[in-house]
Image (cartoon, rainbow, N blue to C red):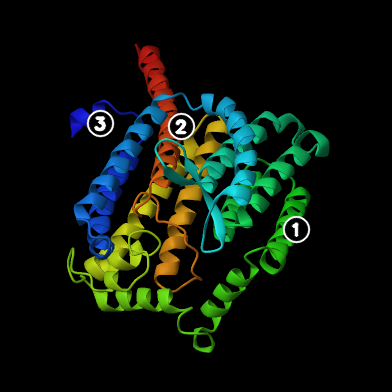
């Protein structure tokens, strides 16, 4: 283990958390895909191998991302934003339609779909961190700072919200947190929040998926008043959680995987509690909390504003997404379709999540290198 860590840089606790989440993901996905593999007449090992390939690929991307100096991501963010806006538009118009939502586009040659909102999250957070850093001298200037920032946030928000409201709301919340950290005035932040609320209301009541959004809120607030089919997912998840007990039924012994829709992605946390019990569910929650704590330390000790904002934005995005997924699984929120980072089965979502982890580790690597330089200065001074 020490030999492996010697080849990596950055916060070791984050690397340990990544490894633990990856192992847990493999076990959970292997257990959860048994039913779907049987229905399709293939071995469950096929899904496990495919998931393993993405996990290994994700860790490889994380490794190379953490080796790149995080300052380079400032320049990359401009390119990402140039790609993201047209890609989101293309997805809405020509993307693969699943459950009345056009969230996916197909990558030619490999015939693999990916959710463009995953790229948009990475693009907007890195772009905001760059813009807030570059505009600090004119941060109160409406034309030079506020309008470009507000325009990018609202544009990405509305394009994602039309097909994926939950992801858009979480990304908008992270953006507001970055604006607060970036010393944007309360008045300007209030305008951004107000604009976001107006756009949110328009999407919910006038957007193409308005019936879906309204139905999900009604099902969450008054499950007894709606068609049982609409609350089926949430009810099956609650059964999985309730029957898990303190220590669970044991790995591979889930019964709700046969009834629970998407037990390998959206509701993987419910399956984990069923198999590993309350102890397993709390342990997984603690892993994300420890990750957030280590990221807060990185933000605190980062000597550069861009690094601090970059690490803060990405870490908030990942942890908020994790908490949202877990909240839905235990019945504390309406069904959203948000995956559990590094645990849910997914293709390109795992890869983009891994890149986000790698960027955070890149900032952490810079923090460690600065600490080492300071330590050497102290030693030289003492000599």
Marks 2 and 1 close (CB-CB < 8 Å): no
Tags 2 and 3 in contact by the CB under 8 Å rule? no
Rendered location of residue 376, percent (x, y): 37, 17
Q: Earlier in the sequence, mark 2 or mark 3?
A: 3
Mark 3 vs mark 1, CA separation in Å: 46 Å
* Residue at position x 62%, y 65% in the image: 209
Q: Secondary structure at mark 2?
A: helix
Please determine whether, in this image, residue 267 is positioned above or below residue 351. below
Quadrant of the snapshot with the N terminus: top left
According to the picture, the residue beneath numbered tag 1 turns out to be 194
Q: Residues within 10 Å of mark 1 (few under 14, many from 20)?
A: few
Residue 363's disc is 2
Numbered disc in front, either 3 or 1: 1
Residue 307, image x, y percentages: 53, 32
Task: Give the image location of residue 94, x and y in percent.
Answer: 59, 48
How busy is the neighbourhood of tag 3: few (under 14 within 10 Å), some, or many (20 plus)? few
Q: Could one spot residue 284 in this view of the protein? A: yes
Q: Which residue is mark 3?
A: 5
Compared across the picture, whether 202 is left or right of 34 comes to: right
- Choose mark 2 or mark 1, whichever is in front: 1
293 vs 131, nearest the viewer: 131
115 and 303: which is toward the camera: 115
* Residue under the image location 58 percent in, 25 percent down: 75
């Amino acid at each position: 283990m020490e030999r492996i860590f010697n080849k990596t840089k950055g916060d070791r606790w984050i690397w340990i958390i990544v490894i633990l989440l990856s192992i847990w993901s493999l076990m959970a996905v292997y257990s959860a895909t048994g039913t779907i593999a049987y229905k399709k007449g293939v071995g469950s090992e096929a899904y496990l191998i495919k998931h393993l390939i993405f996990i290994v690929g994700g860790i490889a991307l994380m490794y190379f991302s953490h080796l790149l100096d995080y300052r380079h991501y400032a320049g990359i963010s401009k390119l990402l934003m140039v790609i993201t806006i047209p890609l989101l538009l293309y997805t809405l118009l020509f993307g693969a339609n699943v459950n009345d939502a056009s969230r996916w586009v197909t990558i030619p040659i490999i015939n693999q779909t990916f959710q463009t909102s995953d790229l948009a999250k990475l693009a907007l957070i890195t772009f905001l961190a760059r813009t807030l850093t570059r505009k600090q001298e004119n941060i109160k200037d409406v034309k030079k700072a506020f309008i470009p920032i507000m325009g990018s946030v609202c544009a990405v928000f509305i394009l994602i919200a039309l097909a994926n409201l939950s992801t858009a709301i979480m990304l908008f919340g992270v953006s507001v947190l970055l604006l607060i950290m970036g010393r944007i005035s309360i008045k300007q932040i209030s305008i951004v929040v107000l604009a976001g609320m107006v756009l949110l209301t328009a999407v919910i009541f006038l957007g193409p998926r308005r019936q879906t959004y309204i139905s999900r809120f009604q099902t969450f607030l008054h499950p007894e008043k709606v068609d049982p089919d609409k609350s089926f997912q949430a009810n099956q998840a609650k059964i999985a959680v309730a029957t898990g007990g303190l220590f669970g039924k044991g790995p591979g012994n889930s019964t709700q995987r046969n009834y629970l829709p998407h037990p390998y992605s959206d509701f993987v946390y419910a399956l984990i509690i069923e198999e590993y019990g309350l102890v397993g569910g709390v342990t997984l929650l603690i892993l994300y909390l420890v990750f957030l704590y280590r990221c807060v330390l990185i933000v605190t000790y980062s000597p550069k504003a861009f690094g601090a904002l970059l690490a803060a934005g990405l870490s908030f995005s990942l942890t908020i997404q994790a908490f949202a997924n877990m909240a839905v699984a235990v019945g504390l929120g309406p069904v959203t379709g948000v995956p559990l980072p590094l645990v849910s089965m997914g293709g390109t979502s795992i890869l983009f999540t891994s890149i986000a982890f790698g960027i955070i580790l890149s900032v952490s690597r810079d923090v460690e290198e600065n600490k080492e330089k300071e330590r050497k200065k102290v030693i030289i001074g003492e000599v």
